[in-house]
Image (cartoon, grey):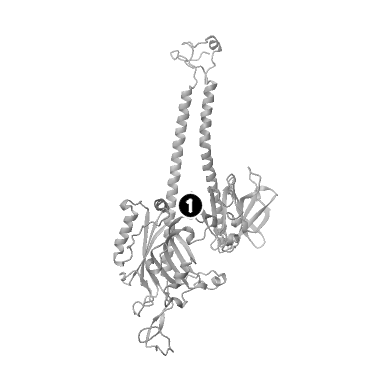
Amino acid sequence: MLPPRPAKRRLRGGSLLPSSPRITAFTLIEVLVACAVLALTLVIVFMIVSQTSSLWKNTTSKSSAFQNARAAFEAVTRNLSQATLNHYLDYYDTAWKHTTAGSASAPPAHYGRFSELEFVSGPVTDLFPSAGGKVSHAVFFQAPLGKTSRTDLAMESPGMLNAAGYFVAFGPRSQYEQIPKFLQGEAESDRLGFRLIEWVQPTESLSIYDKTHLGSQPWKWFRDPIGNGQSCRVMAENVIALIILPKDADNVPLASYAYDSLTSGYDESRTHLLPPLLQVTLVAIDEVSAQRLREANGASQPALIPSDAFQNIATYDQDLADLENVLNGKNGRPRLTYRIFTTTVATKENP
Amino acid sequence: MKPRRSPSHPRVHPDGFSLVELLTVMALLAVLAVLVLPSIRGVSSSTELTISAASVVDSLNLARQTALSVNRPVEVRFYQVPSSTDTTEAFRAMASYVLGNNQTNPIGRPVWLRSGVVLSDTAPFGTLLEGLPGGSSTLPSLGPTTYSYRSLIFRPDGSVALPNTSPSDGGDTWHVMLFNTSRPPTGSTPPANHVTIQLLPETGRTRVFQPGAR
């Protein structure tokens, strides 16, 4: 605290005398410097706070992104291991065509395995007439998942049969799930991206028994409902690839990715059988990487998977290494954070 | 008492500021404040929106979890109440109740949105509040006055007692938008800063849409 200043001296000395005590007040320059220092400190503190919060956001979004992908991966493998064909022995004629007991034109000559159900997996380019944003592989099967939209049915029988399937598709969010109408088409809410889609057809609308799919329209039972977007839901965001690799009981890959339990001729070791083992691989990226892809590609679909990859089962390891190179940012592409989930599930009903 | 000052430092300036200096500093501060305040206001209003949306989602999740764990239907009420700064009644509070045989037991205390944040109750932004049945009751912290509310019920299996789609606009989703009363939606255009919470009746889960949030 300043001591009281002698008023006399100030009044007398109109001019400042060298002997007068130094008056301590801030100069304008000092105040301005102090203001500048304060402003600088505030800016630095604000920068630190905003960087910390963005780091926090990035980390949590990263971990939650892979949490969702992991949960989806576990659900996919759990449901795939429930896949069933529920096959039984039935009559076949001399040319090994399925027939009935009383048929006069094709009398029964053999017993063989038969099932009305079907297991299909393989590249989407084989399974769908047009990709429509779908990439990598897809799998379709029947399993006792017990899903129904009728509450009276759900109460009575928890394990009813459903047709189910999984595939990865690129498109706006509203393509496979319903979002508020006023947000549809909004770039930030209805954003473009790769998503793992689950298709589970409710028991009461099961279309596998519709036999028109057997003749001229193979796979109509899943192509039609998925074409209409029925019974689909997004399981996980930012999943860029799903690869289904069928293996025999000795853990050796089969000859081709494409697997259909419904074969053109009768094959004792293959017809109406599930693949004994299924190696499921799922590749997910995080939300920050997805945002980077959106910025780099705009409205067009990013070409992450080389066009000829995952078509030939013999080059699986090489194709996966190539995909990792793309994701790691080789050839001047943006570097993405990704995770690969892979496991082998055993199916039921192996002979 | 003589001030103990070294005489070797000559006095150069008159003591204190001159009026001009003071005015200069004040003008500079005013200019800085004008430059900085709008962005701080923007940041704080978006923070309040985010916090309010989180509390709405949390209380919906709590109601669902409670319904599952006590195996009883749980009613969630959205109340139309005034706030401390705004006397007009709007949807700013929510409370959950376990529905028993004869009585309703509140779950915790009512949840209040942050000041200035309200829930939309008109389509296309607030199909949820628009389509819900209503009632009126008192609120514990607001004395004997009754306030009107709209309510929904979580079933003991976690689902919500609502049809799969709302009747609005030929089958829109059930959703509610939170916005700041200083920046309301204009017509059918949402404000730049808003949070929309979608409720999926089949599972009782929620989905949050927030533009600009990563």
* Residue B48 visible here: yes
Please determine whether, in this image, residue B80 is positioned above or below residue B170: above
Q: Residue at x 50, y 50 (%)?
A: B211
Q: Is residue A306 left or right of residue A172?
A: left
- Identify which residue, A325 or A223, lies in the foreground: A223
- Residue A175 location in percent, x, y? 48, 61
Residue B192 drawn at (x, y percent) = 53, 47
Looking at the image, is A236 positioned above or below residue B191?
A: below
Q: Which residue is mark 1?
A: A188
- On the image, the x and y values in percent for residue A62 come to 42, 52
Quadrant of the image for the C terminus of chain A?
bottom left
Residue ID at (68%, 48%):
B143
Residue shown at the point (39%, 69%) measured from the top left: A127
* Chain identity of mark 1: A
- Residue extending farthest bottom: A104
Is disc 1 placed on a helix, strand or loop?
loop
- Considering every residue shown, the one lying at the far top of the view is A12
> Residue B201 vs residue A29: left or right?
right
Disc 1 packing (10 Å; few <14; some 14–19; many ≥20)? some
